[in-house]
Structure formats: structure tokens, C-alpha cells
Image (tube, helix red, strand yellow):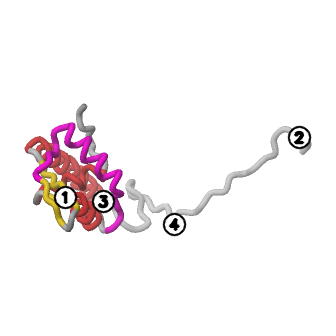
Amino acid sequence: MSTPTPLREPTFLILTALAREDMHGYGIVSDVAALSGGRLALRPGTLYGALDRLTDEGLVERAHEEVVEGRLRRYYRLTEAGRSVLTAETERLRGNVEAATQRLRARPTGPRAASGTSRGPLTAVRPILRPTGGPA
């Protein structure tokens, strides 16, 4: 089974969280929330399902385990294959951002259209509704 590209955002952010250091589940959840500005809150089932899949794909591996306050913490790390996938996805996204940035900078601002003619402000067009079937 191979990792689809483009990566889904949760996968991208999990790999990004692990790019800096080995982390346990709660650490990954916290880091993903911070990386996404709070938009993405991973639930444990989602996280561990993703980690199992990423482990099966060879992108993540178990680093070590420790017992903290009577609870087992399993740490994960990014593999070289995971680093390669994350690097490729980062470059793909960077290319998309650069293309969009160039297009936004090239577009004229104000009421002028790209052809150089002034069309005035945009207005909503209302459709003309005509009854169908039945008496008029």
C-alpha cells in the first residue's frame, strides 16, 4: 500500500510533527493542533489509525516506550521514507503557493477587468422564472 499524494492534511501534519523529534500520541495531537492553528483536533482513534497506517507504509516507526505515572507511552519517529514523502509534499505545496502568489500579484486590482476594459461593479443577476406545466 502506498501513500497517496497529495497527502491529506492530517497525514501531512502528523509527519510534520514527527519531523522535529520522536513523540508520543498526546504530543502529536497537541503539536498538530498548534501547527493547524487549532483547526484540526485529532481524536485518539483517528491518530492511532493514522499511525498504524503510516507504520505499515514505512513512513513512521515506533521509537521506544516508557511508563509514566503507570501509563504506557509509545513514542513514534519519522523514517527516512517518511522524511522523503514529507519533503516531496512540502515542495509540491510550495510550488502551488508560488504559482498562486504570482497569479495574485499579476492580477490588476480595482474594477478593471483583465482585458483592460472597465465593467463597473458586479451586480447579481436574477433569473426570470416562468411557470412550467399547468395553467399560466
Q: Residue 73 carries which label?
A: 1
Query: Helix, strand or loop at disc 2?
Result: loop
Return the residue at label 2: 134
- Residue 32 point in image, percent of width and height: 26, 61
Q: Distance between the residues labelled 1 and 2?
A: 70 Å
Mark toward the viewer: 3 or 2: 2
Residue 124 on the magenta segment: no
Q: Which mark is residue 121?
A: 4
Closest to the observer, 120 or 4: 4
Q: In percent of the image, x 30 and y 52: which residue is there?
A: 47
Amino acid type at mark 3: Leu
Q: How far apart are marks 3 and 2 (CA)?
A: 50 Å
Q: How far apart are marks 1 and 3 (CA)?
A: 46 Å
Q: In percent of the image, x 38 and y 56: which residue is there?
A: 114
Say if 122 sits above or below 6 in the image. Answer: below
Query: Helix, strand or loop at disc 3?
Result: helix
Q: Earlier in the sequence, mark 4 or mark 1?
A: 1
> Quick check: marks 3 and 2 in contact, CB under 8 Å?
no
Q: Which of marks 1 and 3 is nearer the N terminus?
A: 1
Return the residue at label 3: 104
Mark toward the viewer: 1 or 2: 1
